[in-house]
Image (spheres, rainbow, N blue to C red):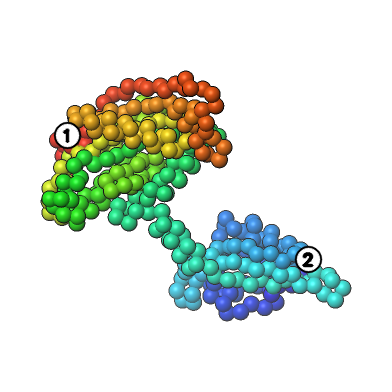
């Protein structure tokens, strides 16, 4: 409890456990909050102390047990209630701190699990498609390009059939780690099928840059790996699609990348081809991000550009 002048009238032991000390004023309580929270936390306290309405705010408070040094900061929900005198004048207020750290941490952990493929550590299909939607929505505002790269492991069924699913799972986990290690922090790698992966790359400026990204991924998968004591040669087919700015649907971009990947697989040669297409009008995103109608333009065009061939995963290379 605090008075109108900002002095603490009463505090219990729980507050001391949360902040690691016994503050004497409201200002000292504010200083015990994380720097990023102090302005909003202080303004809320001042507002209630001045007779404003009650409210709740969140603030991360420092914690230190006696003799233990600095403790782990705790996220608190702080409920503020004003106090008034007989004539309705503001006389101070009450602040109740509730430690919500574990609840927030558990919720974030559950959200992370819900978006992650347990086997590979990559995003799951729903999460990677959401990332593609987000990238295309941002492109509509900024005009930045987006690349979608489809990866399919060639002959993976044979690995499962001859070496067993335990070895197959080890191969998939290794592929996931390699792909995650070959992308930027802003990119999203997702497993979208049994042996299929989708890489979403926002902010890609050109088809040539798309080719370079795909080449880097192909190099990351090239060569052999050890899975449960078995030497497995990785072979993969890549297909990439690039959208120059906004106005494209995620499904259209994925279909283009998937189609390019299957053409690469059908070529049965060492190079991996990359194809960029202009999504026809009927496949552009309409209201709400859904594919739009052709709007009477049956002659919508598709633009394709050839780019340098990429090394095929499976060419003889030494892989750490």
Q: Give the x, y percent position of residue 131.
A: 44, 44
Q: Quadrant of the C terminus?
A: top left
Q: Give the x, y percent position of residue 140.
A: 53, 34
Residue 134, visible in the rendered structure = yes
In the displayed structure, does residue 28 sit left or right of residue 267? right
Tell me: residue 73, above or below residue 146.
Answer: below
Tell me: residue 185, above or below residue 311.
Answer: below
Residue 180, visible in the rendered structure = no
Neighbour tally class for label 2: few under 14, some 14-19, many 20 plus, Cα within 10 Å? some
In this rendered view, identify the residue nearer to me: 32 or 313: 313
In this rendered view, identify the residue nearer to me: 284 or 183: 284
SS class, disc 2: loop
In this rendered view, identify the residue nearer to me: 142 or 167: 167
Q: Give the x, y percent position of residue 262.
A: 28, 33
Q: Give the x, y percent position of residue 90.
A: 80, 69
Q: Quadrant of the N terminus?
A: bottom right
Tell me: residue 206, above or below residue 84.
Answer: above
In the displayed structure, does residue 72 sit left or right of residue 30? left
Q: Quadrant of residue 304?
A: top left
| Mark number, residue 244 | none
Q: Residue at 44% across / 21% down in the picture? A: 301
Q: Quadrant of residue 257?
A: top left
Give the residue at mark 2. 51
Q: Residue at 25% across / 49% down in the picture? A: 172
Give the residue at mark 1. 315
Which one is earlier in the sequence, the residue at label 1 or at label 2?
2
In this rendered view, identify the residue nearer to me: 10 or 230: 230
Q: CA distance from mark 1 to mark 2?
A: 74 Å
């Amino acid at each position: 409890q605090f008075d109108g002048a900002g002095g603490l009238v009463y505090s219990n032991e729980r507050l001391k456990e949360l902040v690691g000390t016994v503050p004497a004023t409201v200002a000292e309580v504010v200083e015990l909050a994380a720097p990023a929270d102090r302005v909003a936390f202080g303004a809320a306290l001042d507002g209630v102390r001045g007779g404003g309405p009650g409210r709740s705010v969140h603030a991360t408070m420092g914690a230190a047990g006696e003799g233990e040094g600095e403790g782990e900061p705790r996220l608190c929900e702080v409920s503020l209630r004003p106090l008034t005198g007989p004539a309705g004048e503001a006389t101070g207020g009450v602040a109740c701190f509730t430690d919500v750290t574990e609840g927030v941490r558990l919720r974030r952990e559950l959200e992370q699990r819900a978006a992650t493929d347990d086997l590979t550590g990559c995003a799951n299909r729903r999460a990677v498609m959401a990332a593609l939607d987000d990238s295309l929505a941002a492109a509509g505002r900024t005009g930045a390009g987006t690349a979608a790269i489809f990866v399919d492991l060639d002959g993976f069924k044979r690995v499962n059939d001859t070496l067993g699913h335990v070895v197959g799972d080890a191969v998939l986990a290794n592929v996931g780690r390699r792909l995650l290690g070959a992308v930027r922090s802003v990119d999203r790698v997702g497993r979208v099928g049994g042996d299929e992966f989708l890489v979403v790359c926002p902010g890609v400026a050109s088809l040539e840059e798309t080719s370079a990204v795909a080449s880097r991924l192909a190099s990351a998968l090239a060569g052999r790996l050890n899975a449960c004591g078995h030497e497995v040669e990785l072979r993969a087919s890549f297909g990439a699609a690039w959208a120059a700015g906004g106005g494209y649907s995620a499904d259209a971009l994925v279909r283009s990348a998937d189609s390019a990947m299957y053409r690469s697989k059908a070529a049965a040669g060492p190079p991996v081809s990359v194809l960029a297409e202009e999504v026809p009008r009927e496949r552009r995103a309409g209201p709400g991000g859904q594919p739009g109608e052709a709007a009477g333009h049956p002659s919508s065009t598709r633009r394709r550009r050839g780019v340098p061939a990429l090394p095929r995963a499976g060419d003889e290379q030494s892989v750490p």
